[in-house]
């Protein structure tokens, strides 16, 4: 079976890439190892801008939106809340599986072939062609795209991921019933070394009384900390029941140093396209798939699948998204070292806009300028952000 591009992984990045390349008339195959979409746990919160980047019709949003988000409450170890709000809807809590179904529908409507339960088992590159064998298929194309997550088979096969280069943290998530948060139109983030060491607990209310309740930590067992958090908050969870449980690792170390080579491209979490401080990767991955498809189309049209040509994708991605990832990683590297007392002080100093900028890796120089005025944080935080 001959194609112009073979995409390994039917996540946000892979589906966006396949759609954008297929709509330019190229033959695209997407192979996914799992039987269903969206197997990996996810808080399922997205900003309103995601739908614009993903070019999803507003008329299709009801098919996957569980609840609009009007704000977020970031809770310091001492219980102080920093409330982040915007006029109108800040974003949405979604059903990620239904969201990916819509993305897959869009890709298929443009001509992409999607094959489920077909893990890549053998990949070879010879004479300018990549050959991929799966459970039942044998595919060939001049371009291979790794969109297969933090355990990327493509990255490892072509030595694009160096030993120890990818930093991940364990994360688990429950879907719980009868969760009584103060305001179901907000999302909640809880910080503290006794709550989630070098990470955070999240609560994302969904439809009805359901909520995604999860945790990501470093150097600790996430389940024990999440269970403890639930136990000490009976006001929210006294009547709650766990109806789903999922666990996985999340990439937080920034982008890999090499994400292209001749005939091979990495996108999404496989490339490390995740905001380190939050672990959010839907928006960054969709953007990666979109930009990579634009450059890949030019490469296929010219017949030049060299790493030099494909690197245009990296350069374009780095102009905005790559910088955000790097700046967020700077913030993570210093914030994860702060004590609970220092986190409490930070909650008193920073405005809601500052918190958003730090989390998303945007305008961090303005945050650093504010922190330079405080003796404790001028060295610990501000100078690191400006480096």
Image (cartoon, rainbow, N blue to C red):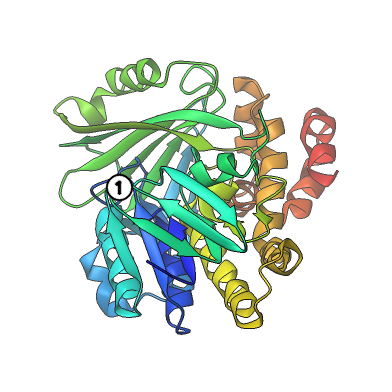
Where residue 349 appears, as percent x and y from the top left, is 67, 40
Instruction: Indicate the position of residue 169 as horizontal and vertical percent values.
Output: 52, 29
Residue at image coords 45%, 44%: 122
Q: Is residue 89 visible?
A: no
228 sits to left or right of 175: right
For the C terminus, the quadrant is: top right
Label 1, residues with CA under 10 Å away: few <14, some 14-19, many ≥20: few
Task: Indicate the position of residue 34 as horizontal and vertical percent values.
Answer: 29, 45
- Of 193 and 253, the residue lying toward us: 253
| Quarter assignment of residue 162 | top right
> Where is 51 relative to 154, above or below?
below
Does dot 1 land on a helix, a strand or a loop? Answer: loop
Q: Quadrant of the N terminus?
A: bottom left
Q: Position of residue 325 (x, y in %)?
A: 65, 50
Identified at 28% across, 50% down, the residue is 136
Between residues 302 and 13, which one lies in front from this camera angle?
Answer: 302
Report the front residue among 366 and 24: 24
Q: Which residue is tagged 1?
A: 183
One can see residue 358 in this view: yes
Total labels: the figure holds 1
Horizontal side, residue 307 vs residue 286: left or right:
right
Query: Relative to 303, is 174 on the left or the right?
Result: left
Furthest residue in direction front, as rendered? 127
Q: Between residues 141 and 384, which one lies in front from this camera angle?
A: 141
Residue 226 is drawn in which quadrant? top left
């Amino acid at each position: 079976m001959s194609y112009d591009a073979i995409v390994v992984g039917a996540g946000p990045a892979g589906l966006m890439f396949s759609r954008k390349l297929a709509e330019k008339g190229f033959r695209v195959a997407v192979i996914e190892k799992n039987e269903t979409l969206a197997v990996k746990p996810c808080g399922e919160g997205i900003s309103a801008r995601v739908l614009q980047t993903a070019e999803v019709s507003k008329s299709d949003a009801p098919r996957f939106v569980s609840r609009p988000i009007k704000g977020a409450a970031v809770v310091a170890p001492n219980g102080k809340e920093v409330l982040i709000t915007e006029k109108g809807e800040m974003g949405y809590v979604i059903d990620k599986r239904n969201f990916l179904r819509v993305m897959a529908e869009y890709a298929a409507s443009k001509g992409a072939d999607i094959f489920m339960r077909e893990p890549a088992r053998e990949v070879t590159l010879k004479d300018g062609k990549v050959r991929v064998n799966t459970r039942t298929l044998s595919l060939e194309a001049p371009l291979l795209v790794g969109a297969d997550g933090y355990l990327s088979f493509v990255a490892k096969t072509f030595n694009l991921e160096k030993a120890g280069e990818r930093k991940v943290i364990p994360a688990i998530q429950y879907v719980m019933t009868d969760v009584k948060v103060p305001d179901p139109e907000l999302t909640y983030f809880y910080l503290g070394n006794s709550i989630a060491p070098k990470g955070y607990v999240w609560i994302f209310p969904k439809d009805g009384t359901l909520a995604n309740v999860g945790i990501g930590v470093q150097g600790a067992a996430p389940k024990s900390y999440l269970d403890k958090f639930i136990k000490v908050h009976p006001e929210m969870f006294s009547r709650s029941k766990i109806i789903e449980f999922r666990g996985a690792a999340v990439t937080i170390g920034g982008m890999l140093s090499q994400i292209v080579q001749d005939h091979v491209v990495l996108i999404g979490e496989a490339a490390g396209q995740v905001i380190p401080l939050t672990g959010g990767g839907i928006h960054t991955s969709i953007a990666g798939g979109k930009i990579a498809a634009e450059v890949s189309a030019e490469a296929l049209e010219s017949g030049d699948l060299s790493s030099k040509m494909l690197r245009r994708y990296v350069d374009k991605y780095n102009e905005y998204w790559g910088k955000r990832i790097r700046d967020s990683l700077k913030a993570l590297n210093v914030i994860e070292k702060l004590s609970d007392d220092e986190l409490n002080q930070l909650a008193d100093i920073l405005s809601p806009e500052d918190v958003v900028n730090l989390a998303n890796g945007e305008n961090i120089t303005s945050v650093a300028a504010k922190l330079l005025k405080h003796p404790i944080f001028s060295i610990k935080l501000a100078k690191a952000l400006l480096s």
